[in-house]
Image (cartoon, rainbow, N blue to C red):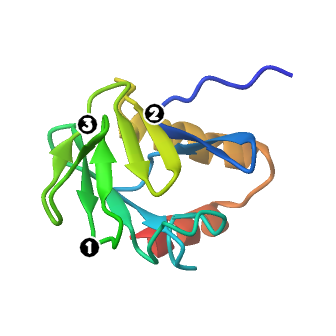
Amino acid sequence: MLMEEPKVSYLEYTLDDKREEEQLVENLVSIGRGKDCTIQILTDGEISRLHCTVRHLDDKRWVVVDEGARNGTSVNDERIEEGVGIILKDGDRIGIGQTIFTFHKKEVEREAALFNEVEQQMKDGAGYHTILHQIIEQK
């Protein structure tokens, strides 16, 4: 089966020898070992509870921020300063611990992607109120 091409920017990474993708539909994506992280990675002992975040800026750019991780965060093999947002470009590699994420930028508007996701959920049988509740909980 062919994987569907993501409609929004996304992070690609390998976890337990399996290729993973996290579509960036939220304004803030947290990465770390903690149970509240958007992307939780338990198999890499060099990753902090909250290692870094990937944030959406109003001008359609994305940044990565090191959140005080013990082993630091790198972009394209260069360690970044804690708390300082580094603008991501398509193909940038984000290193946390032994795990490498590749940022892929898509030009499609996030609102259109969210609409498509809601439309697909409704086709799959989810009700309007269920979907609305999920959206409110993400804020």
What SS does tag 3 mark? Answer: loop
Amino acid type of disc 2?
Val
> Where does the image place residue 88, in percent across and percent down from the top left?
25, 37
Mark 1 vs mark 2: in front: 1
Tag 2: Cα neighbours inside 10 Å, few (<14), some, or many (≥20)?
Answer: many
Residue under the point 15% across and 58% down = 81
Q: Quadrant of the N terminus?
A: top right
Q: CA distance from mark 1 to mark 2?
A: 28 Å
Residue under the point 40% across and 47% down = 95
* Residue at the disc numbered 1: 68
Tag 3: Cα neighbours inside 10 Å, few (<14), some, or many (≥20)?
Answer: many
> Where does the image place residue 39, in percent across and percent down from the top left?
54, 61
* Residue at the disc numbered 3: 88
> Where does the image place residue 72, in percent across and percent down from the top left?
31, 62
State the residue in front, 83 or 9.
83
In the image: residue 118, left or right of residue 63: right
Upstream in the sequence, badge 3 or badge 2?
2
Q: On screen, 6 above or below 127?
A: above
In the image: residue 15, left or right of residue 101: right
* Residue at the disc numbered 2: 8
State the residue in front, 127 or 93.
93
